[in-house]
Every structure is written in structure tokens, then in C-alpha cells.
């Protein structure tokens, strides 16, 4: 199962990695990884074809449960997907920057 650590996500982000947040909008606005695109878990089966192909997709949720489920689905659909272990809560607890509000990159 392709699972990455918070440190691996931080390193990937530094090189422009695509981060997909699969939480609900109300969770996303409370705080998300800078640059993470919101696509709630329930919409993934309908919209996964909108995701980049041929590059890694780092899937994140609150704690890692939903992201593992979505990652499994995306891998079966042909994406190079990785679940972020510990999710946004681990990202925050390790002191990484967080964006609040609906925008991807700023509050």
C-alpha cells in the first residue's frame, strides 16, 4: 500500500507535488495543506478523471482513513496515488503551515 509520511509529503510539496484533500468543505476551510485541492471523497468516483495523470497524487484527509480508501480507488483507476499517513492533523502537529478558508493557497 503506497503510504507516505508527513516528511515525504513536505519534500514532495517543495517540488510542486499535487495534493488532493478528500475531506468535506467545512473541514477544508478550517485548515488545509497549502496548495491542496479539495475534492470530497464522495465526488472522487465521478471526478477522478479530472485529476492529473502521469504524476503522483498525494491524497490527504483528517487522519489518514479516508485518504487510504481514496488512494486505493485511484490506484485501481490508473493513478499514481499515495495516502498521507496521519493526514492533516499530523501535518499540523508537526508544525507545517496551514491555510484557512476556501482558497487553496491563502486565507
Image (cartoon, helix red, strand yellow):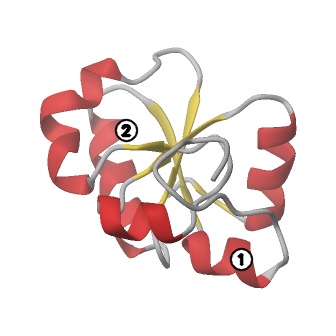
Q: Left or right: where does residue 63 sit relative to residue 15?
A: left
Please give the name of the residue rendered at 58% of the width and 62% of the height, measured from the top-left corner. Answer: 100
Please give the name of the residue rendered at 28% of the width and 37% of the height, measured from the top-left corner. Answer: 76
User: Can you tell which quarter of the image residue 13 is in?
Assistant: top right
Residue 86 shows in this picture = no
User: Can you tell which quarter of the image residue 90 is in?
Assistant: bottom right
Q: Do the residues labelled 1 and 2 touch (CB within 8 Å)?
A: no
Q: Residues within 10 Å of mark 1 (few under 14, many from 20)?
A: some
Looking at the picture, does residue 14 appear above or below residue 22?
above
Q: Viewer-nearest of labels 1 and 2?
A: 1
- In this view, the residue in front, 97 or 70, is 97
Element at label 2: helix
Q: Left or right: where does residue 76 sit relative to residue 79?
A: left
- Name which of mark 1 and mark 2 comes first in the sequence: 2
State the residue position of label 2.
75
Looking at the picture, does residue 47 appear above or below residue 82?
above
User: Can you tell which quarter of the image residue 99 is in?
Assistant: bottom right
Residue 81 shows in this picture = yes
Q: Position of residue 42 (x, y in %)?
A: 15, 53
State the residue position of label 1.
92
Element at label 1: helix
Q: Residues within 10 Å of mark 2 (few under 14, many from 20)?
A: some
The numbered dot on residue 57 is: none
Q: Distance between the Cα atoms at labels 1 and 2?
A: 26 Å
- In this view, the residue in front, 31 or 67, is 31
Q: Where is residue 85 in the image (x, y as percent from the top left)?
A: 60, 70
Please give the name of the residue rendered at 32% of the width and 59% of the height, measured from the top-left corner. Answer: 25
Q: Where is residue 23 in the image (x, y as percent from the top left)?
A: 35, 62
Tag count: 2
Looking at the picture, does residue 105 appear above or below residue 93?
above
Amino acid at each position: 500500500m503506497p503510504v507516505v509520511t508527513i516528511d515525504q509529503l513536505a519534500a514532495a510539496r517543495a517540488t510542486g507535488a499535487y495534493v488532493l484533500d478528500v475531506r468535506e468543505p467545512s473541514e477544508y476551510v478550517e485548515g488545509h495543506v497549502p496548495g491542496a485541492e479539495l475534492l470530497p471523497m464522495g465526488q472522487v468516483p465521478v471526478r477522478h478523471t479530472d485529476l492529473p495523470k502521469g504524476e503522483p497524487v498525494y491524497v490527504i484527509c483528517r487522519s489518514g482513513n479516508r485518504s487510504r480508501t481514496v488512494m486505493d480507488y485511484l490506484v485501481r483507476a490508473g493513478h499514481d496515488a499515495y495516502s498521507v499517513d496521519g493526514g492533516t492533523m499530523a501535518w499540523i502537529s508537526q508544525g507545517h503551515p496551514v491555510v484557512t478558508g476556501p482558497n487553496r493557497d491563502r486565507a
